[in-house]
Image (tube, rainbow, N blue to C red):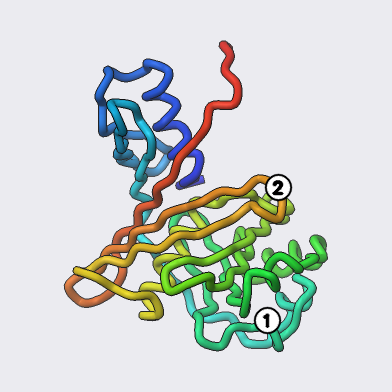
Amino acid sequence: MEFSGHAAVAVGLTAARTGLMPEGTTRLYLHTPTEVLPVELVLEAGEPRKAWVRGPAPRFRDLPPYRALREVLEALGSDERYLHRGLPYGVAFTGLWSLFVPLIAPGVVDALEPEMERLKALCFRLDVATIHAYAPMGPRSFYARDFAPLLGIPEDPVTGSANAALGALLARAGVVPRREGKVLLTVYQGHHLGNPGVVEVQVEYSPTGEPYSVQIGGEAVIVQTGEV
């Protein structure tokens, strides 16, 4: 896997909190099989509170046929009546290819009851790793659920790579407010599983107006420690 955003946030904060880096460190680098990920730590009262990770450059693919979107909606347990017509659907990448399905409200997203085997077959056919259903909560905030049966994960509680790609897709479509060449947004995920998470996404634009850089930010809690 080229990029696991929420895991990178957790690794950066855990390394700082467990003394694996000099006190006061605000930058570290995580080496993956394909690239080096810079991690910026935000300190509060000298303690690492939040981490920002720059992911792979966003990429986009042609829209799948509309009939495929209808099939995905049916496999999710929904239909076209609940599709949000003002937000983009499409396929985007910042580490994993995901299909993004916009719905009209967070309650509709929460009500989804996917047929996992059908969804798995659609992921294989469309050549995507996850199906990311999302809905607006405000001009810069969204609620999402991510399904990845093709990877053996029925539902992921927090998905950094998919939310980074969602930010890039929204920025490219011009549907979120832009300030000084950047878009900042917040995605809420995991509530349906009883494991709520918050992902902050920052998208930067190139001089031509295309999104070229995405960072995700968040906090993490150490639940358990041990030695191998």
Residue drawn at x 33%, y 75% as measured from the top left: 177
Residue 10, horizontal then vertical, whole percent: 47, 35
Residue 185 is left or right of residue 187, and the answer is left
> Is the C terminus in the top left, top right, bottom left or bottom right quadrant?
top right
Residue drawn at x 60%, y 74% as measured from the top left: 101
Q: Secondary structure at mark 1?
A: helix
Residue 23 is left or right of residue 164, and the answer is left
- Proximity of marks 1 and 2: CB atoms separated by less than 8 Å: no
25 to 86, vertically: above or below? above
Residue bearing the label numbered 2: 194
- Of mark 1 and mark 2, the one earlier in the sequence is 1
Instruction: Identify which residue, 196 or 56, lies in the foreground.
Output: 196
Q: Amino acid at mark 1?
A: Ala
Residue drawn at x 43%, y 18% as measured from the top left: 18
Q: Residue furthest front?
A: 45
Residue 160 is left or right of residue 216, and the answer is right
